[in-house]
Amino acid sequence: MMEKPTVDIIIPTYKPGKVFEELLNRLERQTYPISGILVMNTQEEFWNKDWEKRYPKLRVHHIEKKEFDHGGTRARAAEDCKSDYMIYMTQDAMPADSKLVEEILRPLIEEKAQVSYARQLPAKNCHLIERFTRQFNYPEQPLTKGIEDLPRLGIKTYFCSNVCAAYDRRIYEKMGGFEKSAIFNEDMYYAAALVKKGYRIAYCADARVIHSHNYSCGQQFHRNFDMGVSQACRPDIFQGVSSEGEGIALVKKTAKFLIKERKPWLLAELFFQSAFKYAGYFLGKRYRCFPMWFIKFCTMNRSYWEQKEEN
């Protein structure tokens, strides 16, 4: 009987707490054996050293806050990974069941795709608008995407989320891995490069994590500013596959959903959220027009810009 391919879990963390501990517990109960859990932790003083005793598969690297980068930190972790596959997760992505690892690896093992990402389900405390957004972005139907889908799916062809995504390490190294400096969208940068090389991306609806945020309008603004910056930095990927169309479609469908649910008073919240999202995205796409003090005011990731100033 052939041995199963090996897999490591890679998780960047910042001030991890009880939610992260529950994540470790659920990873221990997975049906597919995990070789190791590699944590890239920002600021050692917030780390619970007892976890290293309780979870023998855990390895941790501590970095300073100014060192964190969405692409670079994950790329550093990959250099320490020797398994056949790598699954990247965030510290607040909770496996919905014991088959998460088994299901997300299936397309890679069967060689139907070279990257796969999980379905994100809303948490119990998730607000109604965000609940619908999860459903819009992560439907029940699985999907495998390639270059031939670009005319039909547009920017969604490149969509992938490192909230929970699995990578074939051999292909990852062949492709040069994640971009070393990325404020956001390091997963989509890589996915786009894959697609353009003729590889495929799988959306695994049966691989499920519980993950959602009840962001304020201000938080939506900051997040979408960074998204706009990430797209402006890589016109070779995003030119001609604008996000605006997807955003408008989401707003329209959410509005219809709220009316159908007989909660029209939430349309005002949807309007303000959408306005802040678009304002952040619009300014982020044009970040080169603004002074650094204004960029730091708009961003979610000040350390990214501080690194740029130092360099």
Image (tube, grey):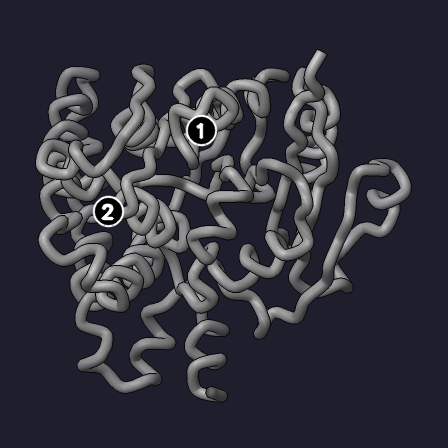
Q: Is residue 271 above or below residue 253?
A: below
Local crowd at mark 2 within 10 Å, few (<14), some, or many (≥20)? Answer: many
Check disc 1 and give the amino acid type: Ala
- What's the residue at 42%, 29% (across, down)? 120
Residue found at the far front of this picture = 1
- Residue occupying image coordinates x 10% and y 32%: 152
Between marks 1 and 2, how big is the CA–CA gap?
25 Å
Which image quarter: residue 289? Answer: bottom left
Q: Residue furthest top?
A: 1
The answer, for residue 126, to whether it is visible in the render is yes
**Front one among 215 and 7:** 7
Left or right: 237, with 43 as reference point? left
177 and 162: which is toward the camera: 177
What's the mark number on residue 273?
A: 2
Q: Quadrant of residue 236?
A: bottom left
Quadrant the N terminus occupies = top right
Return the disc, 1 or 2, that comes first in the chain's sequence: 1
Instruction: From the top left corner, tell me how far across and down residue 90 is, in percent.
Output: 55, 43
Secondary structure of the residue carrying numbered label 2? helix
Q: Depth-wise, is mark 1 or mark 2 nearer the camera?
A: 1
Mark on residue 118?
1
Counting from the top left corner in percent of width and height, residue 211 is at: 48, 33
The answer to which quarter of the image holds residue 250 is: top left
The answer to whether residue 250 is seen in the rendering is no
Q: What type is the residue that disc 2 sits on?
A: Gln
Q: Secondary structure at mark 1?
A: strand
